[in-house]
Image (cartoon, rainbow, N blue to C red):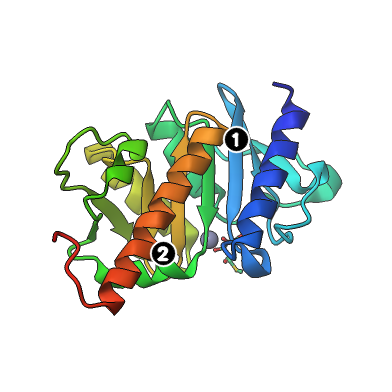
Amino acid sequence: MHHEDLRQELALAARSFYERGWMLGTAGNLSARMAEEAFWITASGRPKDLLDTEDFVSVNLQGEVLLAPGGRKPSAETSIHQVIYQHIPEARVIFHVHSIEANLCGHFARNGQLRLPPLEMLKGLGVPDAEPEIDLPVFANHQDVARIAKDMDTAFTQAIPPVPGALIHQHGVTAWGSDLLSARHHLELLEYCFRYLVQAKALAIGVQA
Ligand SMILES: CSC[C@@H](O)[C@@H](O)C(=O)COP(=O)(O)O
Ligand SMILES: [Zn+2]
């Protein structure tokens, strides 16, 4: 796939996530690794329903800008993408969005972990078990993004998350995959789990039942 096509695919994904209410008011950022040492990432502060190829900046895995159309700045959260690419070689595409459900679910976490409901759909997140006990890591939010990235770096050095995603409390969810489609499916499946947990809580039913 040509690099330019990757940007167009990312722009299409962003528009679709925007329409689902996950990237309102410029929130969120998307990236795709186009080479071993470099990735495209959304420029900072751009409206996510209106991205074009000029709204992507290429950076290397150390976060240095390689190509910035019109002097655009890379996403303020580029360091988080870097940490994921550095620790998880299978990750080629990363989607970070701010959905209401992701933010509500941060409140259900215990000790920095959110227990996912044992749904059949977890199989789409690579969980083979019939009775899974899967905990999604939940990181604290910090205004200094480098601190979030550092916490992730420390945690991922200990253990890669059991499913391809992580939450940042009061902020949003990040999901990744080996290509555009798998990253989208992982994000959709995590969002499905979040919606399920929010609705289960509203109905006051346990998720293990
Ligand atoms: C709507 S403000 C959201 C930002 O603070 C940030 O969390 C975000 O996801 C988008 O930042 P950006 O620099 O545009 O990639
Ligand atoms: Zn964000």
Circle 1 residue: 32
What amino acid does circle 2 point to? Answer: Ala
- Expressed as whole percent of the image width and height from the top left, the position of residue 71 reads 81, 49
| Image disc number at residue 102 | 2
Q: Is residue 185 left or right of residue 124?
A: right
Mark toward the viewer: 1 or 2? 2
Q: Quadrant of the N terminus?
A: top right
- Expressed as whole percent of the image width and height from the top left, the position of residue 176 reads 46, 40
Tell me the residue at 41%/64% (across/down). Answer: 102
Asked whether mark 1 and ligand 1 are closer than 8 Å, the reply comes as no
Q: Is residue 62 left or right of residue 70?
A: left
Q: Quadrant of the C terminus?
A: bottom left
Which residue is farthest right?
70
Tell me the residue at 70%/57% (across/down). Answer: 48
Tell me the residue at 17%/39% (across/down). Answer: 130
Q: In the figure, 91 relative to 69: above or below?
A: above
| Count of labels in the image | 2
Q: Quadrant of residue 186?
A: top left
Res. 142 in view: no
